[in-house]
């Protein structure tokens, strides 16, 4: 038996990347391209069953490819695919066997095959043998059709002789079809799988579950194309493709990772994108544009469209099926390419698009609508008749901004999934490599809905990035007309001859899932390589998002309330306002996540390491990041901070409003703005539905927002503490903790800006109070109630610390100290003209002393005690107290 000899020769050719197939062993063992020359439907006595198959004896021992896909059952059935198997058929006695070829063998001295299954012979003659497929395959080799290079890839060693399998407990064959290229068997199977589960600390049991799977099994002739050129994975990791792992002769540890890619030779013809008839008319063009984006990337018409395809159609060779799934709470879209296990040539693929991607959040709509929470420009004309005709054509939504943004999301998602179907992996460094600034992205997005043919922006270098919000929308618009730089670079490299052709990190950096996962094992995140990070300056973007979230808080919530009160997809329905407001409660507290993330970026490495540079992560040098000595991260942080204007500018802009005042009453101001707006009573929702709010409904909405004032009053203040210096136990003495900034983070210009900020923080009030003071408490003095608590003001005093800086803070700290001393002495003069804190030897005991003497009541003593505490902090370096 020389099947393994053939496979070994075949494998050797693929590893040498030869385009030549002249060796006689290959010609002898390749089955005829037409499957009808090997297989026909079984006929005659004993073959009245649908599952009888007649095999030409001349095709025994020839090489075929067994490709299995399946549809799961349950409430969310989906297609999935298994790794194709290289097989041959062998007859012995009254049995026909399917044998899996052992192409992972690294030597030919021991020739083996894997037995997949045997079938009973029904009849035979000199030229044919007819066997009964019976109830179908009894087991499935449960290997994924895709793999990745690196430690997080398929853990199964290529030297392993056994494979994970899925047990079939019962099945039947529904149909067998024959065409020129393949046999296609439809098999319905009940499967059983199990996993170990702990019911208690001592009791581990095997939990089994059953499922029914509709299998599509295709058998086709195997032919390593003479024009297809396999390509090893880029070991420098400047681009990322899915891979097929194959053994290297005589080296069990030296696995060769061949990338997954299509054969784009002219003789193979186009790849057909088969678009399901389930795609709604509103999104069909967006789906097509997402597909055809890759023709722009590849520079030729590789993909052709076929629309209105029956959703029940089985997978076809050299095609990518686009399934549209009406699933509004799905977690993700996905794609599955199926590759030749020896060469990496992608044979077919499927893309799954759930309708959840048509949902657009109110925050995106408000920003895209130039920060206005309702539709503007609507003309109050009676166009009912015309609108009804338009609604029939556009499914009652095509004119809305919400639909347009949803179409953008569908376009970019389809393009992303097609990238996977073409072999590409995620690249989360795409946005980090973008050449447009975060400010340009924010400004461009504000004009988006007002510009029907907006050209978008390349906010990422790759559609394989995970983008969110405005970045996703702008990139989606951009790819209608032009390719992104990383995608072009990756595809040029994949179809080039050289190992490093076209690769240039100046064009785009690359970073994927395993980089994030490996960094996470060390408790680190990678600066510039995060899922859903935005822009080429992560720090600046977090700052902008925090700023925008506060500035648009009421507008976004109001747009959300209107959108649910007057649902765009139910033009005759108005929901109950009380119910809508109750649902809105879960979004009624300002998030400080963006500020906290910015804080960890600024302070990372001072207390503990939180961030790694992309450079260190790719080099495998996470220990440098872990111990806070990642110089590349420090450089990136300084570059990002410089774009904002520095540490002082960042803090001032987050704390201050447009009038340069400390933000204390931002929410009441926004509520008042809503109350006085022209759109509070009536207008057009962002889904283009007219609305009108009664006086009672307006009152309910105002009451809802007013209830949120108290819980949001200090949210911003507490969040901004993330941007203040933090404790570093390594720098602490035995008796104190040090509050420090990373070295070089703050310049002298920053220090001057922070002096002004801190004095305004000390002045910031939350109202005032009249205190009784003096002899017999006959006098009174009005004092401001501080907006920040004593502990918060004390911590912000650490901004005046000189610890870890390369310049002196003494003079600046003295300026703030004098300001605080003047404030206290002014109060003391009202209590007793002879008092002066600067001459008192024990200022900490002064409040209780004055209270005992009857010169202060309890509230006055408490106020004075808090102010003296701030002063005492400033008397010495607050970073070292």
Image (cartoon, rainbow, N blue to C red):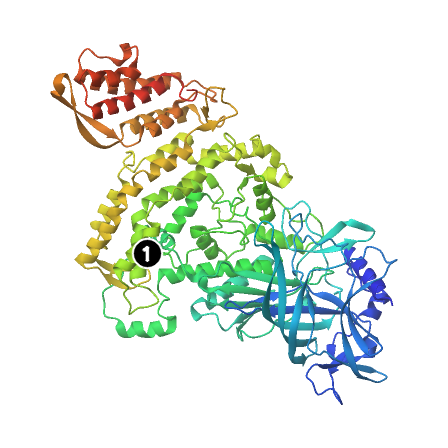
Res. 440 image quadrant:
top left
User: Which residue in the rendered view is the most extreme toward the left?
Assistant: 778
User: Which residue in the rendered view is the most extreme toward the front?
Assistant: 202
Q: Is residue 252 left or right of residue 325?
A: right
Residue 69 pos. (x, y %): 63, 68
Q: Is residue 520 visible?
A: yes
Camera-side residue of 343 and 168? 168
Camera-side residue of 534 and 766? 766
Q: Is residue 400 above or below residue 492?
A: below
- Name which residue lies at 40% across and 47% down: 442
Q: Can residue 270 be seen in this view?
A: no
Looking at the rendered image, the quarter that the N terminus falls into is: bottom right
Q: Could you tell me which secondary element the residue under label 1 belongs to?
A: helix
Camera-side residue of 315 and 453? 315
- Name which residue lies at 60% across and 47% down: 514
Res. 83 image quadrant:
bottom right
Residue 726 pos. (x, y %): 45, 29
Q: Is residue 688 left or right of residue 276?
A: left
Looking at the rendered image, the quarter that the C terminus falls into is: top left
Badge 1, how many Cα within 10 Å: few under 14, some, many 20+? few
Q: Name the residue under label 1.
A: 583
């Amino acid at each position: 038996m020389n099947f393994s000899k053939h496979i070994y020769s075949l494998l050797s050719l693929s590893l040498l990347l030869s385009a030549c197939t002249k060796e006689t062993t290959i010609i002898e063992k390749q089955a005829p391209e037409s499957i009808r020359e090997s297989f026909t439907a079984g006929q005659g006595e004993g073959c009245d069953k649908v599952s009888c198959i007649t095999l030409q004896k001349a095709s025994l021992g020839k090489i075929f490819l067994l490709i299995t896909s399946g549809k799961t059952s349950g409430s969310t059935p989906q297609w999935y695919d298994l790794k194709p198997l290289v097989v041959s058929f062998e007859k012995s006695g009254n049995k026909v066997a399917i044998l899996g070829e052992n192409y992972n063998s690294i030597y030919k001295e021991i020739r083996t095959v894997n037995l997949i299954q045997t079938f009973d012979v029904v009849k035979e003659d000199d030229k044919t043998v007819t066997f009964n497929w019976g109830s179908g395959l009894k087991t499935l080799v449960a290997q994924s059709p895709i793999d990745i290079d690196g430690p997080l890839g398929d853990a199964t060693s290529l030297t392993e002789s056994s494979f994970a399998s899925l047990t079939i407990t019962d099945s039947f064959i529904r149909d067998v079809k024959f065409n020129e290229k393949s046999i296609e068997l439809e098999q319905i199977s009940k499967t059983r799988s199990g996993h170990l589960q702990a019911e208690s600390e001592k009791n581990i049991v095997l939990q089994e579950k059953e499922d029914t799977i509709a299998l599509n099994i295709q058998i086709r002739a195997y032919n390593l194309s003479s024009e297809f050129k396999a390509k090893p994975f880029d070991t420098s990791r400047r681009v990322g493709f899915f891979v097929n792992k194959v053994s290297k002769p005589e080296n069990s540890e030296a696995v060769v990772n061949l990338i997954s890619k299509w054969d784009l030779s002219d003789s193979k013809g186009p790849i057909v994108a088969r678009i399901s008839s389930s795609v709604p008319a509103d999104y069909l063009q967006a789906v097509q544009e997402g597909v055809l984006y890759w023709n722009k990337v590849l520079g030729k018409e590789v993909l052709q469209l076929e629309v209105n395809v029956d959703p029940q159609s089985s997978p076809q060779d050299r095609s990518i099926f686009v399934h549209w799934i009406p699933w509004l709470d799905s977690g993700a879209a996905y794609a599955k390419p199926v590759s030749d296990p020896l060469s990496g040539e992608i044979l077919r693929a499927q893309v799954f698009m759930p309708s959840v991607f048509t949902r657009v959040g109110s925050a995106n709509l408000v920003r895209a609508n130039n920060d206005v929470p309702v539709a503007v420009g609507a003309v109050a004309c009676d166009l009912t008749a015309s609108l009804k005709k338009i609604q029939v054509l556009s499914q009652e939504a095509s004119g809305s901004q919400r639909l347009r943004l949803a179409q953008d999301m569908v376009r970019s998602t389809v393009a992303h999934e097609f990238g996977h179907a073409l072999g590409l992996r995620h690249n989360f460094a795409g946005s980090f490599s973008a050449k447009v600034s975060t400010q340009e992205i924010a400004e461009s997005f504000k004009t988006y809905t007002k510009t029907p043919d907006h050209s978008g922006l390349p906010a990422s270098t790759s559609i394989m990035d995970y983008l969110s919000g405005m970045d996703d929308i702008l990139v989606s618009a951009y790819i209608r007309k032009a390719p992104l730089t990383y995608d072009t670079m990756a595809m040029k490299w994949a179809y080039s001859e050289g190992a490093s052709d076209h690769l240039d990190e100046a064009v785009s950096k690359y970073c994927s899932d395993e980089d994030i996962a490996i960094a996470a094992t060390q408790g680190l995140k990678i600066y510039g390589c995060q899922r859903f990070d935005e822009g080429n300056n992560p720090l600046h973007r977090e700052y902008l998002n925090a700023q925008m979230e506060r500035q648009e808080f009421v507008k976004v919530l109001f747009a959300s309330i209107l959108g649910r009160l007057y649902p765009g997809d139910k033009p005759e329905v108005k929901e109950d306002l009380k119910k809508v407001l109750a649902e809105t409660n879960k979004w009624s507290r300002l998030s400080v996540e963006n500020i906290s993330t910015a804080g960890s970026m600024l302070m990372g490495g001072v207390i503990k390491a939180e961030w790694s540079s992309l450079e260190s992560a790719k080099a495998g040098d996470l220990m440098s990041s872990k111990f806070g000595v990642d110089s590349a991260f420090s450089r990136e942080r300084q570059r990002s901070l410089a774009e904002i204007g520095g540490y002082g500018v960042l803090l001032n802009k987050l704390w201050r409003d447009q009038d340069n005042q400390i933000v204390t009453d931002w929410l009441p101001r926004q509520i008042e703005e809503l109350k006085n707006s022209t759109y509070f009573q009536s207008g057009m929702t962002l889904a283009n539905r007219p609305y009108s709010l009664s006086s009672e409904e307006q009152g309910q909405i105002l009451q809802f927002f007013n209830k949120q004032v108290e819980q949001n009053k200090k949210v911003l203040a507490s969040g901004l503490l993330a941007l203040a210096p933090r404790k570093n136990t390594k720098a602490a003495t035995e008796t104190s903790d040090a509050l420090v900034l990373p070295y070089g983070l703050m310049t002298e210009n920053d220090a001057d800006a922070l002096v002004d900020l801190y004095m305004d923080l000390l002045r910031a009030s939350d109202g005032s109070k009249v205190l009784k003071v003096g002899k017999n408490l006959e006098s009174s003095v009005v004092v401001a109630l501080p907006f920040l608590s004593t502990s918060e003001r004390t911590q912000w005093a650490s901004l005046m610390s000189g610890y870890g800086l390369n310049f002196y803070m003494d003079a600046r700290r003295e300026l703030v100290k004098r300001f605080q001393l003047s404030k206290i002495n002014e109060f003391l003069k009202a209590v007793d003209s002879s008092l002066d804190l600067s001459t008192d030897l024990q200022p900490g005991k002064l409040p209780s002393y004055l209270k005992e003497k009857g010169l202060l009541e309890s509230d006055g003593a408490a106020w004075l005690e808090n102010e003296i505490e701030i002063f005492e902090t400033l008397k010495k370096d607050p970073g070292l107290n």
